[in-house]
Image: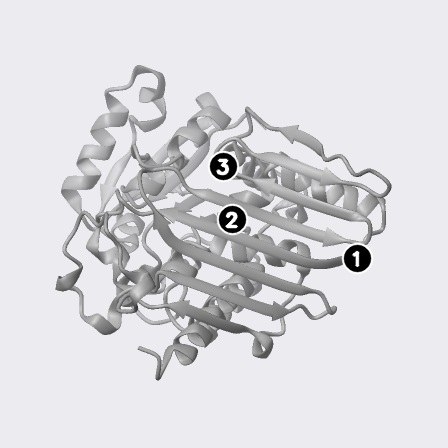
Amino acid sequence: MSSMLNALIIGAGEINFGSVEGPWNHTVRLERILGPRLRVVGLIDIDEARAKTALASKLDAQATHAAWVDCQLFRTVADAVLALTQEKTPQIAVVGVPPFARGTDVPGRDLEQQLVSAFPGCALFVEKPVSSGPEDACWRVAKVLQESRTIVGVGYMLRYLKAVQMIKKIITENKLVVMGTNARYVMAYEYARKPHWWDKTRSGGPIVEQATHFCDLSRYFGGDVRLPSVVAHSVQHNESPGQLSAKRFDEDAIPAENRLPRLTSATWKYEHGAVGSLTHVIALHGTTYDTEFEVYADGYHFKLVDPYSIPKLYIRRPGLAELETHTFTEDDPFHTELATFIDVVDGRRPSSDILSSYEDAVKTYELTWAIRRASEQSAVGYT
């Protein structure tokens, strides 16, 4: 399909336009994937100054000028509905706003439902986590999206890594049954200076907001989780091991009860009997994180190292003591997930090729909250 594709960009921040702190930048990927087919019909952001700056940066770039020349700025979806002509009706909407604005059916926090009502047939690409609101509200949103037959993809890009797909392929080809998963996420916190990130009432906390990718990867291999089985413990900010020496902001301005745990360790049972575990730590200085993800099955051990940067996959197979090593130097899962999403919208691929559906992403959201709640309950009486 070579016809023009109308895109509505929601959110003028780092998710859609990038920053020096991370690899996310959905608009750049769309430009590369669609080339001259891309027509951005609108940019929605309540912060008008930020939206103007983001659009100006695109119009100044010769390579992307054509895609953005017709872009209009709006504060709300309702404003876009009133202004966009039929010719400019969006076919895809890229939702890159904070989770407090989406994932529920509460007015003002119901972005998906606003879009479905305003632009029937428009496909949605939604960032993770799906919300910061109640899980039951997320399920009501999922029902609306399903009943409207809206094509939806959620930004759990690690599923699209070549290394992850290699593990999946080996498991399938050898008819393996996953015995367990183990995720370890150690954050470098020195340059995390935004106070709202350190306030769990605003960010959701490190499991809901950051470790969500590893919780999702765990479910991708282990399947559905028995949520009542989740057990978790944490190191709190006011405990001796939780004292941090390289903070570059004033944490005292955050109420004590809202501050983040420094370490969270959780285990759970999957529905089919396997065991999952996760350790998330706020501990390292500098900018380099330390992340690993393991899958165990009879005769096999898979270890994925540094999935956010240059992934390495170590495999031990039956009868071989030496590890098989695979390094993936040029793998952009953000590009792959968006390219897959566009192919589904164009009808070139089935919707099942979208590896993270909205319903599946809600299950990941439920797991992250189950871990957070279990860790908070276990901390009562120890802090």
- Per the image, the residue denoted by label 1 is 177
Kindly identify the residue that appears in the image at 36 percent across and 51 percent down.
283
The answer to which image quadrant residue 337 occupies is top right
Q: Which of marks 2 and 1 is nearer the N terminus?
A: 2
Q: Residue 334 carries which label?
A: 3
Could you give the CA–CA distance between mark 2 and mark 1, rounded to whole angstroms? 23 Å
Kindly identify the residue that appears in the image at 59 percent across and 28 percent down.
328
What kind of residue is marked 2? Tyr
**Quadrant location of the N terminus in the rendered image:** top right
Kindly identify the residue that appears in the image at 35 percent across and 21 percent down.
64
Task: Give coordinates of residue 265: x percent, y percent.
Answer: 49, 64
- Per the image, the residue denoted by label 2 is 156
Closer to us: 195 or 29: 195
Q: Which of marks 3 and 1 is nearer the N terminus?
A: 1
Closer to us: 183 or 208: 183
Is label 3 in contact with label 1 (beta carbons under 8 Å)?
no
Crowd band around label 3 with a 10 angstrom C-alpha radius: few (<14), some (14–19), many (20+): some
The answer to which image quadrant residue 113 occupies is bottom left
Crowd band around label 1 with a 10 angstrom C-alpha radius: few (<14), some (14–19), many (20+): some
Q: In this view, does 72 lie above or below 241?
A: above
Could you give the CA–CA distance between mark 3 and mark 2, rounded to whole angstroms? 9 Å
